Image: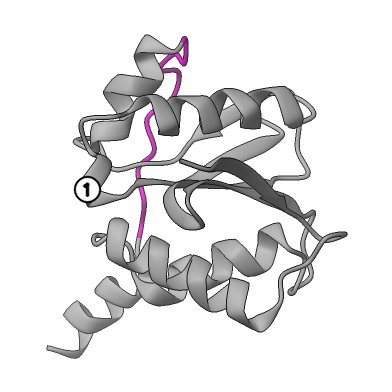
Amino acid sequence: MERSIQMYNAFSGVNPFENISLLNFFRVHTPDTEYRAIQEALDYALKNKPSFGGFVLTYSINSRIVAGVVVNKTGMQGFKSENLLVLAALHEDFKSQTTFLEELINKAVDYADGDIAIYAKPNHPALMMAKRMGFKEQFVELKFQKAALAAKVRV
């Protein structure tokens, strides 16, 4: 069984086949995340859009992606973390083998300059794993959605 970890960033880039593979992997294995949000997270990490950059890590077995993380740099430090772990996914066939995802998150922590925050919904399964790995809850985010307000006003 051939195992490998691949890192993609602005310097390595991704070819069209790799881009489709990454998009499809995260689309299938982060079903609560909109396709557009996945594309933007990848574009920011790879600097395909103006951003501070970041990186993508994948864990593959026999050339099949079984785990992946996307980290975006925030351009901030101090109050906000320098890095944001935006996406973390584990292939459905490997849900009982969380060590693949844990290894990627540990590599992300090693590779990133500065602190890493995780942005996830409150009941996301990766949060429990992150807490076991040493991540601490620090802030609660309340989000005001202007589009939702505009829809109410039109009624």
Find residue 140 and report its horizontal and vertical position in percent: 37, 30
Residue 59: in sight, yes or no? yes
Q: Is 136 colored magenta in this rendering?
A: yes
Magenta part, dominant SS:
loop
Tell me the amino acid under the disc marked 1. Answer: Asp
Q: Is residue 151 left or right of residue 40?
A: left
Total marks drawn? 1
Q: Which of 44 and 107 is in front in this view?
A: 107
Find residue 48 and report its horizontal and vertical position in percent: 75, 74
Q: Is residue 130 left or right of residue 18?
A: left
**Dot 1 corresponds to which residue?**
93
Find residue 39 and report its horizontal and vertical position in percent: 52, 72
Residue positioned most to the bottom? 154
Residue appearing at x 34%, y 70% in the figure = 34
Q: In which quarter of the image is residue 15?
A: bottom right
Q: Nearer the viewer, residue 17 or 113?
A: 17
In the displayed structure, 105 sits above or below 133; it is: below
Q: Quadrant of residue 76?
A: top right
